[in-house]
Amino acid sequence: MTDLFAALRARVLHTLQQVLPDLTEEAASRVEVSPARDPAHGDMATNAAMVTAKAARRKPAEIAAALADALRAAPEIAEATPAGPGFVNLRLRPDALRAVLPAILRAGEAYGDGSAGAGQKVNVEYVSANPTGPMHIGHCRGAVVGDALANLLAKAGYAVTKEYYINDAGAQVTALAWAAYWRYLQAIGTPLTEDEYANTVPGGLQYRGDYLVPVGNELAARHGAALASATKTAAPPDVWLATVRDHTIAAMMRSVREDLAALGVVQDVFTSERGLVETGAADTLIERLRGDGLIYEGVLEPPKGKTPDDWEPRPQTLFRATRFGDDVDRPLRKSDGSNTYFANDIAYHADKVERGFTLLIDVLGADHGGYVSRLKAAVAAVSHGTTALEAVLCQIVHVVRGGVPVRMSKRAGSYVTLRDLIDEVGKDAVRFTMLTRKADAQMEFDLDAVIAQTRDNPVFYVQYAHARCRSVLRAAAEMLGAAAIADAALAEVGLESLTAEPELAVIRRLSVWPRTVEGAALAREPHRIAFFLYDLAADFHMLWNRGKDDAALRFLQPDRREETLARLVLVAATATVIRSGLAVMGAAPVEEMR
RNA sequence: GCGCCCGUAGCUCAAUUGGAUAGAGCACCAGACUACGGAUCUGGGGGUUAGGAGUUCGAAUCUUCUCGGGCGCGCCA
């Protein structure tokens, strides 16, 4: 019994069946036991009477009254009161409420682990930035949201794989190779100026940032002048392209992994788009879908209202996405015969399906919103409906400093890199702050506020609460000895002295943790963890400050050992749950503030 | 023109996924430190949830319309 709300829900359902013998399973499934919004109402409330009234053809208030009467007989319930339009408010016996504390100490950070995921194999794909340069702030939110969501799902009982899809097959990678080749020519002493070189590059010289200088130097060190013409001007691509491209992609991915590691993100699987292309996976898949009657040659209608200037009707290889709810059928081959990005992406998602995942979650930027419906159609088609795809869309982050927007020029080298951001505000602050908004809402990231060490910075507020817990426990170890305050020892302590409202408020909050984990996981909303931690920290700071007005209310009372130990149980449990929550966020708990 | 996301206190954001009197922080006003770390805490003012209509025991949340903002719209990734 580590989830008090699950236990009480079971109690309510059991009792409800006595009141309403004909209770349907459907109605029962809608019964909730939730935290009371107002402590004056009690500890918990249930909507049981309201959600069952219609089927039972009885008035909610009538059921609520009967249910409350029956619940009062339950051993863990002190009060059960019908209220409002049909709620039943519950107040637990104090010992039943306090029982969560030893349960937390015994479970440690595993407290809150759930089984809602039922071991389902889920693949969370996130970041998946093109390997064409250092990661910048635009990539950051997806990285943090995806990583925290994966942690959250794992805690809720899913079997999670964290994955990165390397987009290393498109035209932009060829452009990257041209840019790296320029740095290579420089390294071996080319006579070409940058502009002269740019004129020889199809599509012009992109990626002019100097982060490719080391790559050029490495190529020169490894290959000498072998990749260039005798006059050290641009040689035909077939001489060097594959070599330079592969080396550069590898270098960029090393940099991406380093940046992600600095953010605390370590993914389990990296899948290469090029790998899928080279094994012909996409072509194989297209033929398979053709066998299912889902591929045809056809001509699409032009988009209504806004027709591109160069639009002309053209027969294309199309996937019947409309059969799976998409708006239009989607092209799989470009006019030059090569596969579209979408074609490769179908193959990639089919690969995930074949690896046994029954739930795929793609964390995408909001600019991919229009892409989701065709992906869902593709996953439905290749998995024959056995696998679901969900998209978590991350809206754009506006970086400001003191209310003034930080310009993020696309001009190479002058944008704000992820590494710059981490160096300035720290990994934990970046992660926590990125999770203080719903992913699908635009957010403002104020560098000044994130550095500030005050209450308006949730990271410090939460970490300060943890540091205070640890501070008390260190002082307690001095006073009582380390053995007396070990978790195992504290789990046996009598807790009758914990009766004050601020103490009960913290206990109530701690009891909500498993329910919070489950709710956030099912909704795919890791930001709820951040808000829970903030609220828990607020409850704890409030409790702490009682000791300021009245020294008798401080945690450590030298001449009252039993009472002190009981309070230490509360402190240790609070610290444990904060650590548990920070682990989901991917932020480190701190022992002391500096 | 069509599709998706969004609109909540002056500002930045919540709201237990349809629940009770819509809550926090910042800012503003008034208070609390011989400290288990005051980087904290207590109190106050501030709202027609963009607007209208509907669904029901009950709506910020669901439906619909209007207004406003963001993103996307065949052979980019």
Image (tube, rainbow, N blue to C red):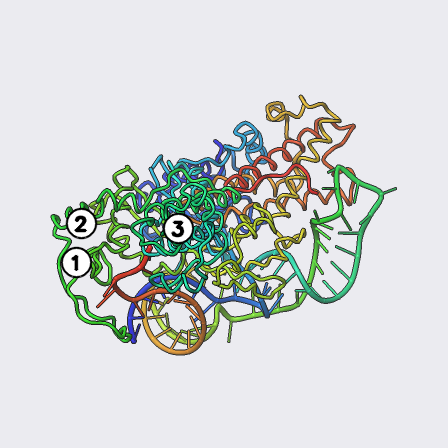
Q: Earlier in the sequence, mark 3 or mark 2?
A: 2
Q: Earlier in the sequence, mark 1 or mark 2?
A: 2
Residue on which disc 1 sits: A317
In the image, what residue type sits under mark 1? Thr
Q: Position of residue A560 (x, y in %)?
A: 75, 28
Relative placement, left or right, of A342 versus B45 is: left
Residue on which disc 2 sits: A286
In the image, what residue type sits under mark 3? Val
Identify the chain of the residue marked 1, using the numbered disc in the image: A
Q: Residue at x 21, y 46 (%)?
A: A382
Q: Earlier in the sequence, mark 1 or mark 3?
A: 1
Q: Position of residue A335 (x, y in %)?
A: 20, 61
Residue on which disc 3 sits: A363
Q: Secondary structure at mark 3?
A: strand
The residue closer to the viewer here, A290 or B1, is A290
Q: Secondary structure at mark 2?
A: helix
Q: Position of residue A471 (x, y in %)?
A: 70, 35
Q: CA distance from mark 3 to mark 2?
A: 25 Å
Around disc 3, counting alpha carbons within 10 Å, would you say few (fewer than 14), some (14 to 19), or many (20 or more)?
A: many
Q: CA distance from mark 1 to mark 2?
A: 10 Å
From where the camera sits, is residue A63 visible?
A: no
Q: Residue at x 54, y 64 (%)?
A: A407
Identify the chain of the residue marked 2, using the numbered disc in the image: A
Relative placement, left or right, of A476 versus B47 is: right
Around disc 1, counting alpha carbons within 10 Å, would you say few (fewer than 14), some (14 to 19), or many (20 or more)?
A: many
Q: Position of residue A542 (x, y in %)?
A: 68, 46
Could you tell me if the residues under marks 1 and 2 are in contact, i.e. CB atoms within 8 Å? Answer: yes
